[in-house]
Image (cartoon, grey):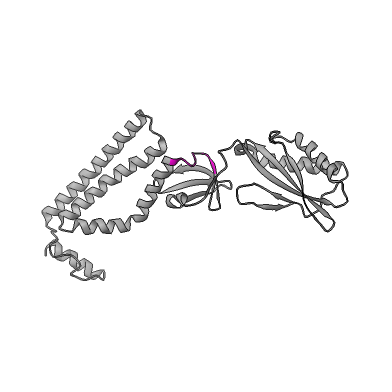
Amino acid sequence: MDPTQILNQILSAAGFSATALPAAVDLSLMNIVRSLLILIGAYFLARLTRGFLERTFTRIKLEPRVAKILTPLAFYGIIGLAVVWVLGGFGLSILVLGVAAGFALQDLIKNFAAGMMILATRPFQMGDWIVINGNEGLVAEVGWRGTFIDTFDGRRVIIPNSNVVTSVVTNNSLKPQLRSTLRFSVPLHVDFARVEGFILDALRAAPGISADPAPRVLLDSLGGDAMNIVVWIWILDPMNQFRTALSAAQRVIKENLQTNGIELNPATTVVMSKGTNEALLQE
């Protein structure tokens, strides 16, 4: 029994038609051995090419992100060409194989092209604090398939590069300061000017709060027996002390108001960050 008949029997046992292979397919022993030698040779050539590129990229000081994409691309590209060559040697149509591979790999190709676009346009760098489709964290890596983000709660999120280039990306690391909004509610009978003064005095002693731009205290609304106040603060070095500075600002404001006989209403809320998904925390 020749190899073609054996393969047709395997196809039949798997539920495929015994005529699934074209009649022109050459499964002779010589062709199989030749194909194995081609694949083995391609594998070693791909490894040599990968090593050569790694040394070259290191010598010319190519950006590591680009090198991490181009090196595996060359490796798998050589393997892929060898596979197409081998399948063509068996008598299968290279055109049909190319079309089928294109459909099968369209998402992979799309993500790779998007990854190259990200590297070219540089909307963010490694370590930047970004927000994409509600995913917030630090950029860990841009690969040939996806962008890796380490979230602040210890998770790693992988976002396909094609989604990154078509989504709104908020980069919180491009500016040296970020503005945050605090919201407080105090009794309606309290003099607003006194409240404003106490808040500004408190913020002068708060670590990590910018004096330029200076904090602003605004009367937001009046409702029932409450006066709702908005406080704008700019946080220095948000990458390293955003949350600690925000916590310190809330603490000193609360303490200074209470020291001067002004109690906060229980409905006080705090808007954590402007420009990201705003999370409201009940105090």
Q: Quadrant of residue 256?
A: top right
Q: Which residue occupies 17% across, 54% down?
A: 88
- Using the image as rendered, state which of residue 113 and residue 93 is in the foreground: 113
Q: Which residue occupies 53% across, 45% down?
A: 150
Name the residue at the top extreme.
59
Q: Which residue occupies 30% across, 42% down?
A: 74
Q: Is residue 132 above or below residue 127?
A: below
Residue stretch in magenta: 121-129
- Using the image as rendered, state which of residue 254 and residue 194 is in the foreground: 194
Residue 111, magenta (yes or no)? no
Residue 128, magenta (yes or no)? yes
Residue 46: percent from left, percent from top: 26, 41
Tell me if I can see residue 143 in this picture.
no
Q: Quadrant of the N terminus?
A: bottom left
Q: How many marks?
A: 0
Residue 73: percent from left, percent from top: 32, 44
Residue 119: percent from left, percent from top: 42, 41
Q: Quadrant of residue 239?
A: top right
Q: Which residue occupies 37% across, 52% down?
A: 110
Residue 93: percent from left, percent from top: 18, 58
- Using the image as rendered, state which of residue 47 and residue 274 is in the foreground: 274
